[in-house]
Image (cartoon, helix red, strand yellow):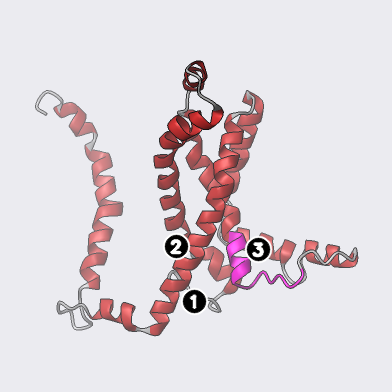
Amino acid sequence: MRRNWKVWLCLLPISLLVAGFLLFPFLNMIYGSLQANDGTFSFTQYKTVFQDPYYKQSIANSLKISLLSTTIAMVFAVFAGYSITRLADKGNTLMVSISNMTSYFEGIPLSFSFIILLGNNGLFTLLFNQLGFHVFGDFNLYSWLGLVVVYIYFQIPFAIILLLPTYQALKDEWRYASNLLGGTSWTYWTKVGIPLLLPGIFGTFTILFANALGAYATAKALVGSTYNLIPI
């Protein structure tokens, strides 16, 4: 510690930044939640959250849509992420760039784009109806199902970006070693590949779940207050 005091000194600015923008607001929020309207210590606000039907409905709705959209997005991302790592350099770079770009395309611009394309008078909706193909049937973008579809759209590329470093950690030498020892592809994936990937997959699942749980602008722009969610 004494020998590396210069290193610790260099870490001071980032430590202050983390404390100022993450730690202090978090502690301030906890402190405020334990106060009643008159400023006294109280658990009244927590009782309200877990007893009021309106709050309980918002918690249930948010957990449901977060769990569903995250699970579906992870299923697609697990296979898509591995496929991207198998591409040649140019193809890999292109797909990573596309995934990186679309992972940040969310909020009001994303909702507006879906409204233009798949809304009641959206481009694809009217086009397929004119051609006689009722592809979307009774699909309503402004419903719970429509909200899930939009969530999945921005969750998939985000999951791919988070999973790519995990896949890149798999070395081809391990597969060759498995084959030399008489192992099959099934042996490699069950004994080597999947056990190494599971921590990264579960970590990505957690981040995606939190991302969906806190999404505000997308849901607000698409369904307004007609669907009760925690952020709204």
- Say which element carries label 1: loop
Q: Residue at x 65, y 63 (%)?
A: 112
Q: Residue at x 27, y 59 (%)?
A: 26
Name which residue type carries label 2: Leu
Q: Which residue is mark 2?
A: 213
Left or right placement of residue 62 versus residue 77 in this view: left
User: Can the viewer see residue 106 in this picture?
Assistant: yes
Label 2: how many Cα within 10 Å (few below 14, some 14–19, many 20+): many
Q: Read off the magenta span.
A: 137-150
Q: Residue at x 44, y 72 (%)?
A: 60
- Say which element carries label 3: helix
Compared with 196, 65 (above or below) is below
Q: Which residue is mark 3?
A: 112
Label 3: how many Cα within 10 Å (few below 14, some 14–19, many 20+): some
Name which residue type carries label 3: Phe
Question: Which residue is more in the foreground, 190 or 125?
Answer: 190
Cα separation, mark 3 vs mark 2, equals 20 Å
- Say which element carries label 2: helix
